[in-house]
Image (spheres, helix red, strand yellow):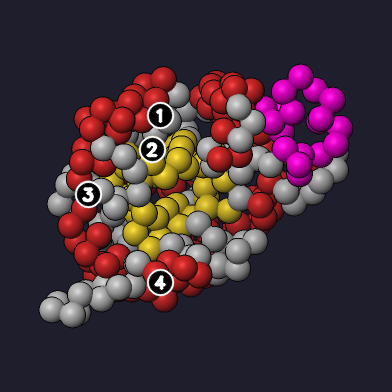
Amino acid sequence: MNRKQLFNLIQKKKSFLCVGLDTDINKIPEHLLKTEDPVFEFNKGIVDATHELCVAYKPNLAFYESLGTSGWKSLQKTVEYIRSVTDEIFIIADAKRGDIGNTSAMYAKTFFKTMDFDAVTLAPYMGLDTVSPFLNYEGKWSVILALTSNKSAADFQYIEDKSTGKKLFETVLETSKKWASTDQVMYVVGATKAEALTDIRKIVPDHFLLVPGVGAQGGSLEEVAKYGMNDHCGLLVNSSRGIIFASSGEDFKEQAKAKAEEMQRGMAQFLKTAGLI
């Protein structure tokens, strides 16, 4: 899926919602724990309830890896199920890998060939060597960490080069945007840093941004749309806990759908106001 196809999908669904499948076994509704694969059954229910309202899913791999081989099986079954339900979806592996050489090449093979993800999140600390193996896969995306919302982001991301006045995250953007086209690279920018989106858009005006933190983490969808949207939307806004754990009961699917519908309606209005639909 290239940038134009992703934008077309956003226009069709009137949504730039990404649902984060951060499936915590300790938060799954109790009645599902009796099934053979509770994680998959939960994900299946969420996908059934939300796939018409979102353009992307983002499984956070930590929640699956923590369960060992059963977690990996649940993850693969989840990806396969999403593909069986719809071909109008973008699936991101939230893996935050950041190695080089053969190791990076094997990560790329894992997520793009073995697991059939469309994109994977990457930590760029080791430079182009980290990302280049992922760029060898046509139609696949590298989602590079740029500016995150956590408190200790300032430890590194805001370090200023005294000779240029540029912050480290700005250098990451300026350097990495040269590595590949806007059809292969997008950036993670935390929603609670929405005010920084204006400056980020000056550096990467045409790239897609994956924006976590709206909902349970306190980020504002309105501010993200105001400061981050470009002429092809250019946003994938993620909500995880606020949607998937809207209910801990047997009505979890209905409540997840209601929350996703609420976000989708807001997104449709922002797209309409911007003249994109």
Q: Which mark is residue 32?
A: none
Report which residue position mark 1 lands on: 111
Indicate the amino acid at tag 2: Ala
| Stretch in magenta | 25-42
Indicate the amino acid at tag 3: Gly
Q: Image height check: is 102 above or below 5?
A: above
| Sequence-first disc among 1 and 2 | 1
Label pair 1/4, CB-CB below 8 angstroms: no
Indicate the amino acid at tag 1: Phe
Name the one closer to the observer, 100 or 231: 100
Name the residue rendered at 31%, 60% in the picture.
231
Label pair 1/2, CB-CB below 8 angstroms: no
Q: CA distance from mark 2 to mark 3?
A: 18 Å
Name the one closer to the observer, 48 or 266: 48
| Sequence-first disc among 1 and 4 | 1
Report which residue position mark 4 lands on: 154
Q: Which mark is residue 119?
A: 2
| Sequence-first disc among 2 and 3 | 2
Instruction: Confirm whether the magenta stretch covers residue 33.
Output: yes
Name the one closer to the observer, 101 or 219: 101
Mark 2: secondary structure: strand
